[in-house]
Amino acid sequence: MIAKEELIKLLPLAFGETNLPLPNKQTGKVREWYDLPDGKRLIVTTDRLSAFDRILAKVPYKGQVLNQLSAWWFEQTKDIIANHLLSVPDPNVSIVTTVQPLPIEVIVRGYITGVTSTALWYRYSIGERTIYGYDFPEGLKKNQALPEPIITPTTKGGETGHDERLTCAEVTEKGLLDEKTWAQVQAAALAIFKRGQEVANKAGLILVDTKYEFGIAPDGSVMLIDEVHTPDSSRYWKADTYQEKFNAGEEPENFDKEFVRIAYAEKGYRGDGEIPSMPNELWAAASERYITIYEMLTGKTFEAGAYPIEERLLKNLKELL
């Protein structure tokens, strides 16, 4: 593991953005996209960390972990469904097939938990018993395992700019997807989640819930895209203490980026107003956690890429630029 002191030294060099000489740059919360010839796209994963729909900081090695961990999961799940990944020419870069993203996000949940407005436990705690089209019995406890994982889709942004909840039936009823495509997406999502839970369990973790995105390839086939089972897209708990914590009515030990959200919430920040400053130690701890999750899940030693990243990118991508 990289020493915390070294991580703190790298904070000023954390990777914030790119300006590559490629066309049609698009920017998301964490990733940046560029068009390449022959139906390909270049995706750069930065060190930006977002929560509450805000960019809070830049965390050394976060981008590398997300990019390489997703690549690893794409390899682990390609027997279930094809994915858009073609190559990884740099620790922070993926070359992918350009696809048409589906207009929904596919959330798979294995536990009733969460406190955001779209979370199962929040809806249950305010008295709802039919949530996302599923009927839930009385007497459930927060963080309890569901009998079987369920799919709770949402729109992407919607009219309000926020994800809007959908039932599985509404995906086809509202014309978002045809029945054949939606059936394939649901089957793939549940199979990928099952694979993820199995791998996580062997690593001493519980894959609690996650978000998948899919797209339509040029040949009309459905592909898995974006990221897979990363600490940004997924909730992980420590497996060895879960049952004891649950029985005691305590929160599980989270092992994703949730501890960053908690740190801000303790300062009264939930996305509105000025972003409070946080100590460097928090961001070093976040970097450590991302690296640790990568190593636990993959069984590989994390090989840190060189900083500053911009110089390395230009070198590794010179044949494309």
Image (cartoon, helix red, strand yellow):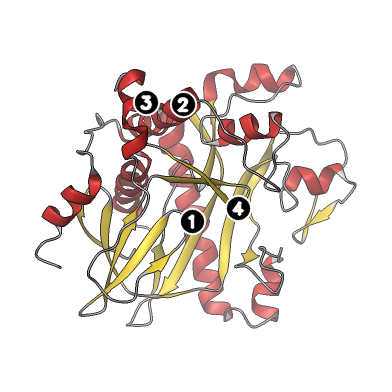
Quarter holding residue 152: bottom right
Which label sits in the foreground, 2 or 4? 2
Image coordinates for residue 15, horizontal then vertical, percent: 33, 46
Q: CA distance from mark 2 to mark 4?
A: 21 Å
Is residue 219 placed above or below 264 in the rendered structure? below
**CB-based contact (under 8 Å), mark 3 and mark 2:** yes
Helix, strand or loop status at disc 1: loop
Is residue 287 placed above or below 319 in the rendered structure? above
Kind of residue indicated by mark 1: Lys
Kind of residue indicated by mark 3: Ile
Quarter holding residue 19: bottom left
Helix, strand or loop status at disc 3: helix
Residue that badge 1 annotates: 29
Q: Quadrant of the N terminus?
A: top left
Residue 56 left/right relative to 165: left
Residue at figure coordinates x 72%, y 53% from the top left: 118
Tell me which label, 3 or 2, sits earlier in the chain: 3
Q: Which mark is residue 53?
A: 4
**CB-based contact (under 8 Å), mark 4 and mark 1:** yes
Mark 2 nearby-residue class (10 Å; few <14, some 14–19, many ≥20): some
Kind of residue indicated by mark 4: Asp
Residue at figure coordinates x 66%, y 71% from the top left: 158
Which label sits in the foreground, 1 or 2? 2
Decide if residue 1 is in sight here: no
Mark 1 nearby-residue class (10 Å; few <14, some 14–19, many ≥20): some
Q: CA distance from mark 4 to mark 3?
A: 25 Å
Residue 125 left/right relative to 166: right
Residue that badge 3 annotates: 8
Residue that badge 2 annotates: 280
